[in-house]
Image (spheres, rainbow, N blue to C red):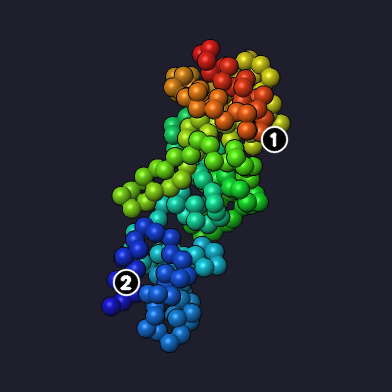
């Protein structure tokens, strides 16, 4: 059985080195074979020890959101990426933005650019959702409310002290439709404010949302 046939069992998954070595267990020099597969375009290296099917592979590749979860973790997709996915901001986002408990970093790969911003505990754990992209791909992502809070918390210089300021930030800067804002779960945000950075800004956010 060829490598392409073997790897079909892991379609839509990021491939760890352990998985690939298990598929190549009959080879005397599996590490050399991995190098050959990369050169042949059947594998693409994301980082040391993590791969996806290459451009010449017929195996279905994982979505960028799932790669982001595996590339630097624990982490969840958030900020502009999640805001765009949930339909809050009109822009299409090409860079995948995530939040992690580890150090902030940016990773440039052959399949895209991934950025990670650090969040403190326990704030990190609030407002997370498991999003089913395909029957085989489930990613950890911020809810619309958490993605918005992350944007406020992690944007340098943003300190929301009045309703006018909040409205300007949400409607003018982020260009979020007011009907989408009215649909947000204010109680959900209220439940984690006390443990959040920029708590006063988030309190002003919920006050503004309640008056829309």
The quarter holding residue 41 reads bottom left
Relative image position of residue 73 (x, y in whole percent): 55, 53
| Quarter the N terminus occupies | bottom left
Question: Can residue 89 be seen by looking at this rendering?
Answer: no
**Residue 156: which disc?**
1
165 is higher (above) or lower (below) than 104: above
Q: Is residue 196 visible?
A: yes
The spot of residue 33 in percent (x, y) is 44, 80
The residue lying furthest to the bottom in this view is 28
Residue occupying the point 62% across, 33% down: 195
User: Looking at the image, which residue is at 63% across and 15% down?
Assistant: 164
Q: Residue lying furthest right in this view?
A: 157
Residue behind mark 2? 6
User: On the picture, is 36 further left or further right than 126?
Assistant: left
Is residue 94 depicted above or below 211 in this figure? Answer: below
Residue density around tag 1, few if under 14, some if 14–19, many if 20 or more, within 10 Å: few
Disc 2 crowd rating (10 Å Cα; few below 14, some 14-19, many 20+) is: some
Q: Residue at x 46, y 45 (%)?
A: 140
Give the CA separation, mark 2 to mark 1: 47 Å
């Amino acid at each position: 059985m060829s490598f392409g046939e073997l790897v079909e069992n892991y379609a839509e998954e990021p491939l760890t080195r352990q998985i690939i070595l298990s598929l190549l267990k009959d080879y005397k020099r599996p590490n050399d074979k991995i190098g050959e597969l990369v050169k042949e375009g059947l594998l693409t290296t994301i980082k040391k020890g993590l791969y996806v099917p290459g451009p010449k592979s017929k195996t279905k590749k994982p979505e960028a959101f799932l790669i982001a979860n595996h590339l630097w973790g624990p982490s969840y997709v958030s900020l502009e990426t999640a805001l765009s996915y949930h339909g809050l901001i009109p822009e299409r986002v090409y860079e995948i933005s995530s939040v992690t408990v580890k150090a902030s970093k940016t990773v440039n790969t052959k399949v895209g650019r991934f950025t990670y911003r650090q969040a403190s505990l326990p704030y990190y754990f609030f407002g997370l959702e498991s999003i089913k992209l395909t029957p085989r791909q489930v990613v950890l992502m911020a809810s619309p409310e958490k993605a918005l809070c992350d944007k406020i918390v992690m944007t340098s210089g943003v300190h929301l002290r009045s309703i006018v300021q909040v409205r300007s930030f949400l409607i003018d800067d982020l260009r979020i439709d007011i009907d989408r804002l009215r649909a947000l779960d204010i109680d959900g945000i209220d439940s984690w404010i006390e443990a959040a950075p920029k708590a006063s800004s988030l309190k002003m956010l919920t006050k503004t949302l309640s008056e829309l």
